[in-house]
Structure formats: C-alpha cells, structure tokens
C-alpha cells in the first residue's frame, strides 16, 4: 500500500450530478473500495434519502440506527453515526428515507447550508481517514449544497448518452454559488465518463464531445458499461469484492489510481 497523502487537499470528495442514474452511487461505492485497497482509510457519507450506497455496502435498514439525518437535523456528533462495513478500512454514515425531509426540517436554520461542514470539522475526521466520499442525491437541493459546502472537491459522473452535458452548466453554477457563499476553496476534481459502451457510436461521440468541451477536467479513465457493476449491490459488495477481475473492477481501480495521481500533481 502506498503512503497516505501528505497534503489535506481534496481529502473530502462530493460525488454530484443532479441527474439520477448517471453512476454517482456506483462511483461512490467503488471508488471508495478501490482507494481502500491501496491501504487508505475511507469514510463514505450517504447523503441520498434512497440510501443506495448504504444498501450496496450491506448496511440494512434495520441497522441504520444513527444516520446522516441525525447528524444534519438532530445535531448528533458525526462519529456516532459512523458504522464499519464488511470491507476493512471502509466506514460509512448511512442514510434513510428520513433524509428526504431535511430540506423542510432545516428551512429556518441559519446554518442550514453548512451543517455537514461543521459536523465534519467537529469530528476531526482527518485524524482517522485519508478520504471522505459523499454520495449526493439526484438534485441540487440543500443536501447537495451541504456536501459541496463540506467538500474539498466535486467529482461529476457523466453518463455517455445524448444529453450528457445537459445540466452540467447548472451544476457548475451551483459550484460557483457555493464558492461565493460557503466554501471559497471548492475545486472541481473532474468529470468521469460512465456507462461507456465501446460498440456504440453514440457513446464514442458523446465521449469525444465532452472531452472537446471540458479538456483535462475529464478523467482519462472511462467506466465501461458492465453488468457486474449493476449486480454487485444486490450482493452487498463493491465490485472489487464481488468480481475482482471484471472490467468494472479494473476500471474503478484505474480511476482510484488516476485520482491519487491527480492529487499528487495538485499538491506538488
Ligand atoms: P446514481 O447514483 O447517479 O443515481 P447509480 O450509480 O445508482 O446512479 O446507477 C444507476 C443504475 O445504473 C444502477 O442500477 C447501477 O447499478 C447501474 N450502473 C451504474 N454504473 C454502471 C455501469 N458502469 N455499468 C452498468 N451498470 C451501471
Ligand atoms: Mg445514487
């Protein structure tokens, strides 16, 4: 395993895109699992009321006693909501459907945009984890704002389909707003092309188009469409465990390597 990062930069990563079904949760789980394989300690925070990241890592609903909701709304210490997963060095703050009322519950709270940021700071998470990965809901709501407010950088999965770029400008606008009001140092970590199908011309065209528009912001690593990736959550395992040699597994390992490489470059 390589050394943990010397620099704090980009320790906390928000995985965001207001479109649903683009690969946010799949990326949150499997990037986290691939980082863990390199010897790093990772905390995944499930910030989607659907709780797919929690389910996908085997935290059944009846085991979600303290959750992201308690941290954001009830002011419970973040550490009380941390649970271990079956994967060594990977911990999680799970989510339940309660979280869908967070917007309403926080509406009159002056600090509503920075609840997660404050909770993470109070927990001194950097003492125990090399990375925090936040799985955002498919919306630019208060939960996603909280994730961006707490994060060092935003990672954006883009599905290789016709309207891939649509919505991206809205997402980037939100990042700018968060920078202005809440988190001036927020970076865009990059864009990851997901569900790429090399036999499909459209997939190729979309990938080229996105690269032409966004340049180096787009990761070299591309996540292929791979049925093993969609099966893994029902076995409550990341792809690196469920099918370690699958194309999906290799892709997420490559993604973790590129992420680490880019971090080292940014820190240099
Ligand atoms: P989001 O969190 O953005 O809503 P998900 O990660 O849940 O998206 O992915 C949506 C669906 O597509 C899920 O059923 C997931 O298993 C599947 N999926 C995600 N990435 C891939 C992939 N690379 N290949 C095949 N299926 C995928
Ligand atoms: Mg999701």
Image (cartoon, helix red, strand yellow):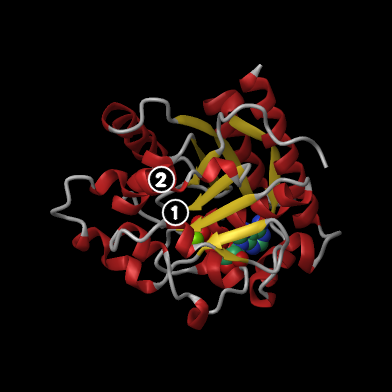
Q: Nearer the viewer, residue 26 or 165?
A: 26
Q: Give the CA distance from mark 2 to mark 1.
A: 21 Å
Residue beneath the point at 49% across and 35% down: 153
Q: Nearer the viewer, residue 171 or 5?
A: 5
Q: Is residue 169 left or right of residue 7?
A: left
Q: Quadrant of the C terminus?
A: top right
Q: Callout 1: helix, strand or loop?
A: loop
Circle on res. 122 = 2
Is the residue indicated by label 1 positioned so its CB lies within 8 Å of ligand 2?
A: yes
- Which residue shows up at 40% across the image and 57% down it? 77
Q: Is 77 on the left or on the right of 61, as rendered?
A: left
Is residue 206 visible from the viewing direction of this image? no
Whether residue 186 is situated above or below residue 192 in the rendered picture = above
Q: Dot 2: what SS?
A: helix
Image mark for residue 136 = 1
Question: Mark 2, residues whose alpha carbon is within 10 Å: few (<14), some, or many (≥20)?
Answer: few
């Amino acid at each position: 395993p390589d050394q943990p990062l010397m620099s704090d930069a980009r320790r906390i990563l928000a995985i965001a895109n207001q479109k649903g079904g683009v690969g946010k949760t799949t990326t949150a789980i499997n990037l986290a699992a691939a980082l863990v394989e390199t010897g790093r300690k990772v905390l995944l925070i499930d910030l989607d009321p659907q709780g797919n990241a929690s389910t996908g890592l085997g935290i059944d609903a009846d085991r979600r006693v303290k959750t992201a909701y308690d941290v954001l709304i009830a002011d419970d210490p973040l550490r009380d909501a941390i649970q271990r997963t079956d994967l060594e060095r990977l911990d999680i703050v799970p989510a339940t459907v309660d979280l869908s009322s967070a917007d309403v519950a926080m509406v009159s709270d002056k600090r509503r945009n920075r609840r997660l940021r404050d909770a993470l700071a109070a927990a001194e998470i950097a003492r125990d984890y090399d990375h925090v990965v936040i799985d955002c809901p498919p919306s630019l709501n208060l939960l996603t704002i909280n994730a961006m407010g707490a994060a060092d950088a935003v990672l954006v999965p883009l599905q290789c389909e016709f309207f891939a770029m649509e919505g991206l400008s809205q997402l980037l606008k939100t990042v700018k707003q968060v920078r202005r009001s809440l988190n001036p140092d927020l970076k865009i970590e990059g864009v990851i092309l997901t569900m790429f199908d090399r036999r499909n011309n459209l997939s190729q065209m979309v990938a080229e188009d996105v690269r032409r528009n966004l340049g180096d912001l787009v990761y070299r690593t591309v996540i292929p469409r791979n049925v093993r990736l969609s099966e893994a959550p029902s076995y409550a395992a990341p792809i690196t465990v469920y099918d370690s040699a699958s194309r999906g597994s290799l892709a997420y390992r490559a993604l973790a390597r590129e992420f680490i490489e880019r971090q080292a470059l940014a820190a240099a």
